[in-house]
Image: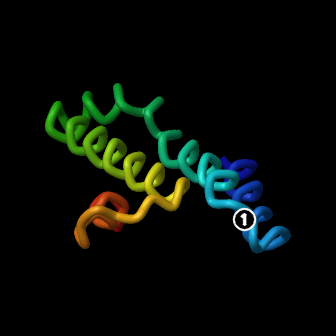
Amino acid sequence: MWTGALTGSAFRVLWVNAPHWLHTPCYLLLGWAPVRYLPDFLHTGGAAVVALVVTGGLRYSAGAVVYAFSVPTPHPAGSAFTRCSTP
């Protein structure tokens, strides 16, 4: 986890104008790291918790793809992909 966080941060600090598609995968992998805990989520929180976590992860990933390729959002709410899935 720390390696991914430091790698993503290093891109932003050392190479300020780095293309988004280059550093976004670091953060995307960090976002999906908790997948290994889904069985624990299912055991303690139930299927609803797992469904919410997976739905949030998919929305986060969709927003990351839009951000990485700098595709203009088709609708003003398009950036909500990442805003809705992060606190």
Q: Residue at x 69, y 60 (%)?
A: 19
Return the residue found at the far left.
Answer: 48
Left or right: 70 as drawn, with respect to 55: right
User: At which x and y percent is residue 83?
Assistant: 33, 67
- Identify the residue shown where x is 82% and y is 68%: 15
| Frontmost residue, 47 versus 62 | 62
Which residue type does callout 1 highlight? Ser
Residue 84 location, quadrant: bottom left
Mark 1: secondary structure: helix
Location of mark 1 (residue): 9
Along the line of sight, which residue is nearer the eye, 65 or 13? 65
Q: Position of residue 4 (x, y in %)?
A: 69, 49
Residue positioned most to the right = 14
Above or below, comparing residue 53 to residue 83 in the picture: above
Residue at 34% x, 26% y: name it: 39
Residue 21 at x, y = what percent?
63, 52
Q: Position of residue 18 (x, y in %)?
A: 74, 64
